[in-house]
Amino acid sequence: MTTAALRTTRFSVLDRSRTRQGRDPGEALRESVRFARRAEALGYHRFWVSEHHSVPGVAGSAPTVLAAAVAAATSRIRVGTGGVMLPNHRTLVVAEQFGVLESLFPGRIDMGLGRSVGFTDGIRRALGAEKGAMADFGEQLAELAAYFTDGPRAHPQVHARPAEGLRVPAFVLANEAGADLAAAAGAALVIGGLRGEERTLAAVARYRAAFRPSAWWDQPYVVIAGNVAVAGTTEAARRLLVPEAWALAHSRTHGVFPPLAPAGEIESLEMTGRERSLYEEGLRGHVHGTEDEVAAALEGLIERSGADEVLVTTSSYDREGLLDSYARLARLAGLPGRAGTGSGPGAGSGSEGLRGGLDQVAHGA
């Protein structure tokens, strides 16, 4: 089931290099690069990587470094960050890093930016960014833009080379409040749209009304982000979401975000009342189901929000099931890759076709 709303909307991927129980972090990073090649073959528009520090369950700590590896391993898909957390960095260094990426891979680099700081007090101290640093995000965005345009800045004698004069599109990862900052900066808005939809739609409306054209974007651009899981049955799709839901519940009850565990192992756990409540909460608010169910849900969301793009953020312990989900989504959205045309290695929805595509990626085909 491919609808008009899905056919006219871009679909992209955010991968956080999630580690899996019993596997080392290096494997998660290598899987991210292989995943990017698969996403490109399927016809996804962008592939983004994330920034997390001192989190056992996430290997992606240096997004511009990983983005370089992804861009070098692909040829067409846009590559970027979801995102670089500006409070953790000097804007000059961020401009220089993206200037290098854009110079190496012209016309393919996205600059996704966020205002989060470290998960704990210790991490924040190690990064030199306390909670209060988030309040300066608007000023940091302005400083960063000035390095690309040679605009007014605190140190006019300092130039960000080779960034100056380059146009790298900026995206702000935001909640409802952050939408106002994205509008003021003239950046694209990336906002979670699958939970708390009423607040999200209100924030999107405010963003569009207040948007100021900039060197980055001439007009508003809205990306709705969230977990999407597609499988042969509704229950199979739901089980893809189980590992992430448990990791979130565990982090909120134990203070540590763990590697992903198999769904079957999690479902057999004896959880405390609070763990069970948080786990069940973590399973709600996502788009999941069969292809027809997911197509209907996404079409409604896209029509209500007017989103230009959907950024899919799903992670799971089951790599084969996860990649099958992305292939099914590509097909129902009519993406121009192998899944969209129904031809070529890995085009089938079954595990045999998917495994063939993965083998080719792993061997550099």
Image (spheres, rainbow, N blue to C red):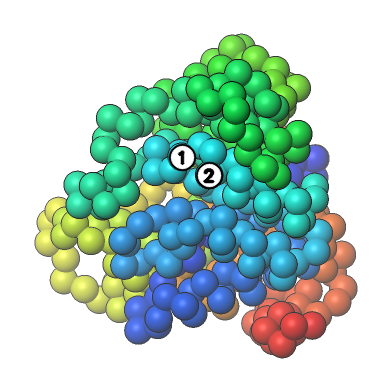
User: Would residue 140 be seen by someone viewing this image from the given angle?
Assistant: yes
Residue in the image at 57% along x and 69% along y: 32
Between the residue at mark 1 and the residue at mark 2, the CA separation in whole angstroms equals 5 Å
Q: Residue furthest left?
A: 272
Up-down: is 360 above or below 297? below
- The amino acid beneath tag 2 is Val
Q: Which quadrant holds residue 259? A: bottom left
- The amino acid beneath tag 1 is Arg
Disc 1 element: loop
Q: Which percent across, then down, holds residue 355?
A: 67, 84
Q: Which percent across, then down, holds residue 310?
A: 64, 44
Of residues 65 and 57, the one nearer the viewer is 65
Q: Within 10 angstroms of label 2, few (less than 14), some, or many (20 or more) residues?
A: few
Q: Within 10 angstroms of label 1, few (less than 14), some, or many (20 or more) residues?
A: few
Q: Could you say which disc has been placed on residue 93 in the image?
A: 2
Answer whether labels 1 and 2 touch (C-beta < 8 Å).
yes
Q: Which percent across, then down, holds residue 99?
A: 67, 46
Disc 2 element: helix
User: Would residue 195 be seen by someone viewing this image from the given angle?
Assistant: no
Q: Is residue 170 left or right of residue 137?
A: right
Q: Which percent across, then down, holds residue 228?
A: 55, 54
Residue in the image at 31% along x and 40% along y: 129
Residue in the image at 49% along x and 66% along y: 17
Q: Is residue 70 left or right of residue 75?
A: left
Up-down: is 345 above or below 128? below
Task: Check the picture and name the quadrant holding the C terminus.
Answer: bottom right
Q: Could you say which disc has been placed on residue 90 in the image?
A: 1
Q: Which quadrant holds residue 175? A: top left
Q: Which quadrant holds residue 40? A: bottom right
Residue in the image at 35% along x and 84% along y: 22
